[in-house]
Amino acid sequence: MSQMAGTENTPHAAGLPIRPLRRREYELLAASGAFDNEKVELLYGQVVQMSPQGTEHAFSIARLNKVLILALGDLATVRPQLPFAASEYSMPEPDLAVVSELRADAHPERALLVIEVSFSSLAIDRRLKAQLYAETGVPEYWVVDVAHGEVIVHTGPSEAGYRRIEHVGRERVLVPVELPTVRVAVAEILPPAA
């Protein structure tokens, strides 16, 4: 974190207008090496540092990746921790995104399902990213809450956010709205209960 973060001597704290970074500008900066050795993503025009991954976080991503790839076959593609072109001012890197088409010349702008695995980033994933994915029209967004042993399923996207939010425990099986032949057992994607 920079020395300026958290102080009152920042342009934002002083009420000065901040010019958001566009996705294309962010991509050019990244290609030039501006973010080498940094884990960052673009959210609402601001470059945000990503949380480091603990072992439980990594476990859930690996399990989800395997389960989804096996369940999907050739129906869709799983993109683990890769850019998602959500809007002109946002390019998050969700833990997993399921997309129906791949292009060599651009990151996907649509996803059938987006998943974030949360431990320390739960507040950001439940509020900021949920709003972003809803605005983008992602039909279903899962937050895998490792600490509480559940998946928070968001469906019914709108400009105001997701209309339906359900907390799903480890005893349940998830069936994505856009992928009705896919079954994901919650217990299979969470670290073993202590």
Image (cartoon, helix red, strand yellow):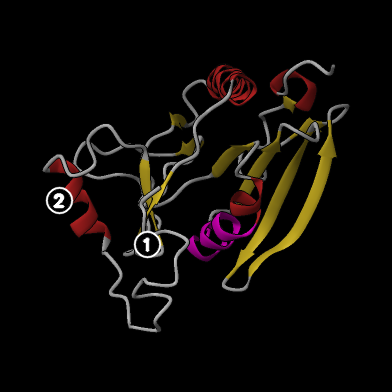
Q: Please state which of the two labelled residues, at mark 2 or mark 1, is closer to the viewer.
A: 2
| Residue positioned 19% across, 42% down in the render | 105
Q: Residue furthest right?
A: 171
Amino acid of disc 1: Ser
User: Horizontal placement of 52 versus 57: left or right?
Assistant: left
Residue 73 horizontal side relative to residue 85, left or right: right
Q: Quadrant of residue 102?
A: top left
Residue placed under numbered mark 2 in the picture: 28
Chain part drawn in magenta: 127-137
Up-down relation of residue 185 to residue 93 (above or below): above
Q: Nearer the viewer, residue 52 or 60?
A: 52
Counting from the top left corner in percent of width and height, residue 4 is at 37, 60
x 24%, y 45%: residue: 106
| SS at badge 2 | helix
Kind of residue at disc 2 = Leu
**Residue 164 sits inside the magenta stretch:** no
Where residue 20 appears, as percent x and y from the top left, is: 30, 70
Give the mark, 2 or 1, whose residue is nearer the N terminus: 2
Q: On the picture, is 167 further left or further right than 154? A: right
Q: Residue at 38% x, 58% y: name it.
A: 90
Q: Disc 1 designates what residue? A: 87
Q: Main secondary structure of the magenta part?
A: helix
